[in-house]
Amino acid sequence: MAGFLRKRTLHERAAFQLYGAAVAAARDPYLYATLGVPDTLDGRFDAVVLHVYLVVRRLNAEAETGPAMAQSVFDAMFLDMDINLREMGVGDMSVGRRNKAMWEAFHGRCAAYAAVWDDGPGLAAAFARNFWRGAEPPVDSPAALVRLALAQDSCLAGQDTATMAGGSVHFLPAEEAAR
């Protein structure tokens, strides 16, 4: 029993590290200052969702251990969202409802991105719809986000699964990825 618990703790630790790397990549100032991603709670949420989606997509490509690790990254994300809501002063009675809304938004965005992944203009439209939520995005920003997502996806695809399972992942700088 102790061995099972130790493995679970190590697995969760790695998932939190992968999630933390995705959050760090989503905080790259280039996304906000140059690409015009709204520097708001919603805009930052969408940037985190994109980067976590990329990690989950990469992990799910590994048949043996990937899906379980991807689920752990997802769990880490929503535990962090719960903690952040509480730190922002959201009352206990509202945290569950708000977390559920973010969970649904995450799944909706992942489904939308997966459905048009190989369709550049379709993916750009999905990014525009989600990141700018009805507002006019800056010229070429959705296309730049497509380039960024595809470059990050390629970068992640080249990373060793065992290294990722250990909690280590590398993202390209946003400026480099968006070229």
Image (cartoon, grey):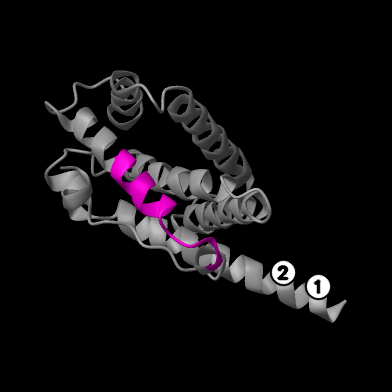
- Relative horizontal placement of residue 75, taking residue 108 as reference (left or right): right
Residue underneath mark 2: 8
| Residue shown at the point (68%, 73%) measured from the top left | 9
Which residue occupies 81% across, 73% down? Answer: 4
Badge 1 element:
helix
User: In this rendering, would 92 be left or right of 177?
Assistant: right
- In the rendered view, does 56 fall on the left or right side of 123? right
Residue 89 percent coordinates (x, y): 47, 54
Considering depth in this image, is 35 or 39 the residue closer to the camera?
35
In the foreground, 60 or 21:
60
On residue 4, the disc is: 1
Q: How many numbered badges does the structure rendering display?
A: 2
Question: What's the residue type where badge 2 is placed?
Answer: Arg
Give residue 28's position: percent from left, percent from top: 24, 55
Q: Which residue lies furthest to the right in this view?
A: 1
Q: 10 Å neighbourhood of mark 1: few (<14), some, or many (≥20)? A: few
Residue 48 belongs to the span the image colors magenta: no
Q: Does residue 159 show up magenta in the picture? A: yes
Tell me the tag on residue 26. Answer: none
Q: What residue type is labelled 1?
A: Phe
Looking at the image, which is closer to me, 67 or 47?
67
Tag 1–tag 2 contact (CB < 8 Å)? yes
Query: Which residues, given as a range, are shown in magenta?
Result: 149-162
**With 142 as the anchor, is 105 left or right in this view?**
right
Say which residue appears at 32% left-offset and 40% top-offset: 149
Please identify the quadrant where the C terminus is shown. top left
Quadrant of the snapshot with the N terminus: bottom right
How far apart in space, not on screen, are marks 1 and 2 (Cα)? 6 Å
Residue 27: % across, % down: 28, 55
Residue at 57% x, 65% y is: 165
| Residue 144 on image: x %, y % | 20, 35
